[in-house]
Amino acid sequence: HKTEVVAAQGVPCGVMPDEPTSYPVVLKPITNMYGMGWQAYVLKSRSDYQKHWGHTGMWMPLCEGPHRSIDLLLDRDGNVVWWTCFEGELTRTFGAFSEWRWTHQSDPGAHSAVDLFSRTLLPRLAGYHGCICFESIGDTIIDDNVGADGAEVGYLLLMTYKKPGERAHGRHGLSALP
């Protein structure tokens, strides 16, 4: 799935044992239930690649820039109706953060990331409505997850959101989604 997210943006990527054509790249698990950069490595050369040859993850170019986590709320028509952004403060450990700072919508880079998501990944989610979270580093989206990191907040917003002229019903506004 992460490879589809990256490839949809035209960014070169692959899965092990496919070898990158240029370096540096980041090698990371395709699914990481542990978080915090678990089993993620920066490969600077073919020699580094060979040291990690048995890894079962995926690689992509090493991205630079702010690491953002953006939560979106999609309405029943698949339109972005609300979003917010957090920026990670990196630690010395690759892929780990000491804190996430809420920037909401004040960061112009976050606006660019939401626009990129809307152009490249949102069309692939036809029929989906609800919360989604994606992460970006600089100008590249590196991952997305159905359901937001702040899912409780997003779900409450989803339950209270109504289109202009739509009559509210249910305890929080709209009734629960199937």
Image: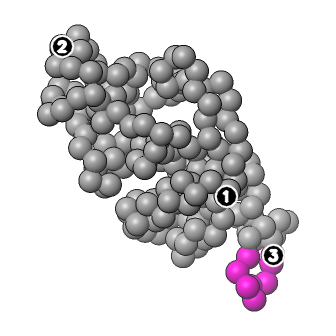
Residue drawn at 15 percent across, 28 percent down: 19
Percent x, y for residue 29? 37, 27
Disc 2/disc 3 C-alpha distance (Å):
61 Å
Question: What label does residue 47 carry, if any?
Answer: 2
- Mark 3, Cα crowd under 10 Å, few <14 / some 14-19 / many 20+, is few
Residue drawn at 23 percent across, 44 percent down: 12
Magenta residues, start to end: 162-169
Label 3 or label 1, whichever comes before in sequence order: 1
User: Which residue has dot 1 on it?
Assistant: 105
Whether the residues at callouts 3 and 1 have beta carbons within 8 Å, the answer is no
Image side of residue 117 versus residue 165, left or right: left
Percent x, y for residue 8? 31, 55
Which quadrant of the rendered structure holds the N terminus?
top left
Marks 3, 1: nearer the viewer = 1
Question: Which residue is farthest bottom?
Answer: 165
Give the structural element (helix, strand or loop) at label 2.
helix
Percent x, y for residue 59? 29, 32
- Mark 1, Cα crowd under 10 Å, few <14 / some 14-19 / many 20+, is some
- Residue 99 vs 91, above or below: the answer is below
Give the residue type at disc 1: Gln
Label 2 or label 3, whichever comes before in sequence order: 2
Residue drawn at 70 percent across, 53 percent down: 104
Give the structural element (helix, strand or loop) at label 1.
loop
Percent x, y for residue 21? 14, 34
Give the residue type at disc 3: His
Question: What label does residue 169 carry, if any?
Answer: 3
Which quadrant of the rendered structure holds the C terminus?
bottom right
